[in-house]
Image (tube, helix red, strand yellow):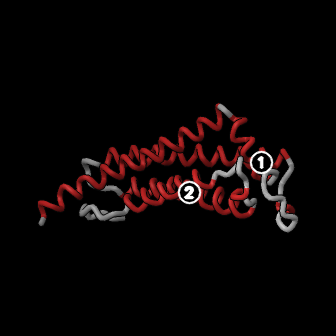
Amino acid sequence: MAENQTPRASLLPLASTLLVGTVALYMALVAFSNITDFGTNQQFVQHVFAMDTTFKDEDLMWRAIESKGIQNAAYVLIIIWETISALVLIAATCFWARALGRRTFHTARRYSTLGLLMTLLLFGAGFIAIGGEWFVMWQSGDWNGLDAALRVFLLSGVVLLVTYLPTNDGAAG
């Protein structure tokens, strides 16, 4: 039985390294794209906040934010959040890679948790809850990012779970 546990235990940290690195790459590319092509997703945020492509239900339209200043400030905050989470996840990936030979993963797990929680909050609370429900993004045929947000949310959640699977290293935390 010990023979069967050793390969699994040695592969889980490698899996965590690669999966955290995947989310880090994704977040870095998202932040980079939003910085270098500011206008594309700026339009997305503006339309979601303005609720101008929803059903125009008067019971909901009071939620709309039409101020370009507030819309742009929110978008800049999103980009900052994405950039910080990408940097934290890149650091986590480096900690995982350095820890592979040492079998102590506490720091890697801690940074992974922070970066993945930042990603989960952005896509879960920010895009799914606030964008999807508060600003009823689900009603828009043109500016509905719920499917993409759900994919990133689920990926990040699965990666977070994988990083905490037991590795028989004596350092589960």
Question: What residue would you read off at disc 2?
Answer: 150
Q: What amino acid is at disc 1?
A: His
Q: Are marks 2 and 1 in contact (CB under 8 Å)?
A: no
Question: Height in image: 18 above or below 118?
Answer: above
In this rendering, does residue 131 appear at all? no
Task: Choose top left, top right, bottom left or bottom right for residue 130.
Answer: bottom right
Say left or right for 137 vs 119. Answer: right
Task: Identify the secondary structure beneath mark 1.
Answer: helix
Q: Is 162 left, or right, of 32 in this rendering?
A: left
**Other-residue count near label 2 (Cα within 10 Å), few / some / many at <14 / 14–19 / ≥20:** some
Calculate the distance from the C-alpha at mark 2 to the C-alpha at mark 1.
19 Å
What residue appears at the point 65 percent right and 57 percent down from the top-left corner? 126
Where the N terminus falls, by quadrant? bottom left
Report x, y in % for residue 97. Answer: 33, 44
* Residue at position x 67%, y 48% in the image: 78
Q: Nearer the viewer, residue 142 or 114?
A: 142
Residue 123: x and y, percent?
60, 55
Q: Quadrant of the C terminus?
A: bottom left
Most distant residue in the top direction: 36
Which residue does the image show at 47% across and 47% down from the upper left? Answer: 23
Residue underneath mark 1? 47
Q: Is residue 123 above or below residue 73?
A: below
Relative horizontal placement of residue 20, taking residue 55 as reference (left or right): left
166 in relation to 137, above or below: below
Is the residue marked by circle 1 packed among few (<14), some (14-19), or many (20+) residues within 10 Å?
many
Q: Which of the marked residues, 2 or 1, is nearer the chain's N terminus?
A: 1
Locate residue 96, reporting x and y percent.
Answer: 36, 49
Nearest the eye: 151 or 101: 151
Q: Secondary structure at mark 2?
A: helix
